[in-house]
Every structure is written in C-alpha cells, then in structure tokens.
Amino acid sequence: MKLAIMQPYFLPYIGYYQLIGAVDLFIVYDNIKYVKKGWINRNRMLLNGQDAIFSLPLKKDSDALDIRDRELAADFDRAKLLNRWRGAYRTAPFFEETFPLLEKIVGFEDPNLFRYLFNSLQMTSEHLGLKTTFKISSEVPIDHSLKFQDKVLALCEAEGTQRYINAIGGLELYDSAAFSARGIEFRALRAKPFPYEQFGQPHVPYLSIVDLLMFNSVSKLGEVIATNYDLVEGA
C-alpha cells in the first residue's frame, strides 16, 4: 500500500496532484498548525504574462490555531475571485471546460478553512480523473501529540503502509533509515519540468493547477500527472 501525507493547499501546482496520483491513500493534515504566509490559502496565477497571487481571505484569529480551527473571512467575495480568473483566462483554450469547476469549488459554502480546502482538492482530483482515496489525519487512530517524522511513521503504520512517498522536500526532513526500520520504503517525488503554451509568452512555471487546466486538456494533464516525475530514494 502506497501512502502520501500533506497539509492542504488551495488549488496547488501539478506536483501536488502527481503525489496524489502516485499513491493508493492520500492523508490530508487537518490537525497541524496553520502556517501564515505559506501556500495553504493562496497560490499563483498568470496575469498579463507574469505570476500574481490569489488567496482566500481568513477570519482574524490566533496564529497558533490548527488549520481545522481557522475560518474564511465573513466578507470573502467569491465573485471577485472568479472574476479575476475570468479576466486573466477568458481567452485560454480550455477556459470553458475549466471555469465551471472553479465556480463549484469557490461556491462551496462551508466557512471552515480545512473543509473548504479538502473539498477543493477532492473536486479537482476527480476532475483530473484521479482515483486515489482521501482521508483526514485526525480520523486515523494514532497518538496525535506526536510531531514531524514520528507522526508520519505512526500514520504509516496505522494504515499498513509498504511505501511512503513524500514531496521532494522530504529528502531533507526525513530519515529513510527510520522508515526502513519499520519495514516501509521511503521515496520522494521530484516533478520534472512541464513547459506549455501560455498565450505565446515566455513560460511562467510552477503556477496553480488553475493555470495548467486553462492551457491543457484533462487527458494531457492526466499523462503528465502519471509519468512526468521521478521517485528518489532517501539517503
């Protein structure tokens, strides 16, 4: 059984979906601290040939809260976010296929940040044809006071994992020998470059999946998700 574990991001770049597609079970952290100025509630889009930030506004609250305890701002203007995408991408080749998905994602009415993000990940994955099972971290019966690698190992063991796959940053965070000692293979997913046409301008890489969906067919992205990466062994 192949497992990956990640915190939720809002419409992340394609490497996140490659990680989802590479495993049987994808656990999304809800009971870890919200990271301010990270990528949990924001991402990058193409605007006039350059990258620009779009974000989900949050209700003001303590920075010590977990992701599952944060909420969207009461004045979150869903129409404004959709109009930004419409203005930026209305002439993109796959706008008509992509925009209804974004309308459904943005229109999700639950104000809880985690549930909003979790829904967006599930909807986007389904649109991309991914069959991976999702699970929420707090629903796995482990000692949730564990931190970092110890928590990952506990989640792996609870789910009967044979291979754990992490984003490439995991090579610096985790000790592959600790996984091997538990009978678990450790691998890190390294996405390969994927340049594609963006209105005939120089390619701007590592943008949100929104950008990729606007310029590429779902079938093409399915191929990239399934094949355009390497699995690297830990040291």
Image (cartoon, rainbow, N blue to C red):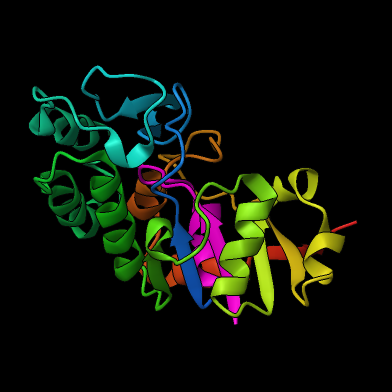
Residue 45 lies, in percent from the top left, at: 38, 34
The answer to which image quadrant residue 176 occupies is bottom right
Q: Residue at x 24, y 25 (%)?
A: 58
Q: Is residue 19 left or right of residue 139?
A: right
Q: Is residue 140 above or below residue 149?
A: below
Q: Which quadrant of the rendered structure holds the C terminus?
A: bottom right
View extreme (right): residue:
235
Residue 82 lies, in percent from the top left, at: 16, 36
Q: Residue at x 28, y 36 (%)?
A: 69
Q: Is 18 in the magenta?
A: yes
**Along the viewing direction, whichever of 175 and 2 lies nearer the viewer:** 175
Res 233 visible? no
The answer to which image quadrant residue 191 occupies is bottom right
The answer to which image quadrant residue 78 occupies is top left
Q: Residue at x 41, y 36 (%)?
A: 40
Q: Is 36 in the magenta?
A: no
Residue 62 lies, in percent from the top left, at: 33, 19
Q: Which quadrant of the rendered structure holds the N terminus?
A: bottom right
Tell how many labels: 0
Q: Residue at x 26, y 39 (%)?
A: 113
Span colored in magenta: 1-21
Res 66 visible? yes
**Along the viewing direction, whichever of 121 and 14 lies nearer the viewer:** 121
Residue 67 lies, in percent from the top left, at: 36, 38
Q: Is residue 189 above or below residue 181?
A: above
